Amino acid sequence: MKPKKTKNSKHKSGSKKITDRNILEEIIRVDHAGEYGATRIYDGQIAIFGKDSKIGKTIQHMADQEQEHIEKFNELIIEYQVRPTALLPIWNAVGFALGAGTALLGEKAAMACTVAVEKVIGTHYQEQQKLLEEDQKKLKKIISKFEKDELEHHDIGIAHDAEKTPGYKILSKVIETGCKAAIIVSKKI
Ligand SMILES: [Fe+2]
Ligand SMILES: [Fe+2]
């Protein structure tokens, strides 16, 4: 049995803050789920518009970045030994349906979908960086980079007249609420 710590046995690493393991697992699980869902949304949109159309090429640029993001989280989930969410098959179907569904409403609606999703994800990534302590500098840097990519996607959506979609406010609200709900369940389940 180890001797009990006395007042004189403080270890030197005591000053370095360590991220709570549960928080760390939730962050990796939900980001992995979200990036997977993002690839499926853009898959759905490209399936409707075709990748050779003008809008298809713009979407493909964002889809390529999402592919990088999911590949990184595929690595991280193994490196950190985090169980992926059990809901991946759902995000597969829901993501594609959301992408294809908004694309069927038109280019502006597809961009409104991007704006709504990326707004939620961007904010979420910002909040996560505050939860990561000094021991997770590498992960923090990755999330910070991805946050910038997501905000770029958001701005692309705005630049492509997302806000001129008929029923923009209600559409955004529905998608934002759905994304927030998806975040809550993907952390735990
Ligand atoms: Fe992403
Ligand atoms: Fe994105």
Image (tube, rainbow, N blue to C red):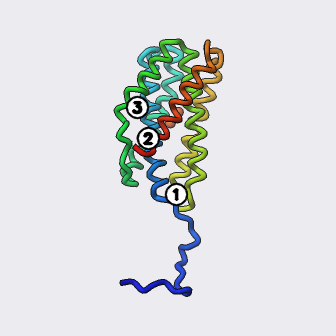
Residue at the image position 64 percent from the left and 23 percent from the top: 158
Q: In the figure, 72 relative to 162: above or below?
A: below
- Circle nearer the viewer, 1 or 3: 3
Give the residue at x 59% y 25%. Answer: 173
User: Residue at left 40%, top 54%?
Assistant: 80
Q: Nearer the viewer, mark 1 or mark 2?
A: 2
In the rendered image, residue 65, in percent from the top left (x then y), is placed at 49, 34
Query: Does the closest atom of ligand 1 sit within 8 Å of the Cβ of label 2?
Result: no
Expressed as whole percent of the image width and height from the top left, the position of residue 128 reads 56, 48
**Alpha carbon distance from label 3 to label 2:** 10 Å
> Along the line of sight, which residue is nearer the eye, 119 or 144?
119
Badges 3 and 2: C-beta atoms under 8 Å apart?
A: yes
Q: Which image quadrant for residue 108?
A: top right
Dividing the image into 4 quarters, which one contains the C terminus?
A: top left
The residue where tag 1 is placed is: 136
Q: Which mark is residue 91?
A: 3
Q: Nearer the viewer, residue 137 or 118?
A: 118
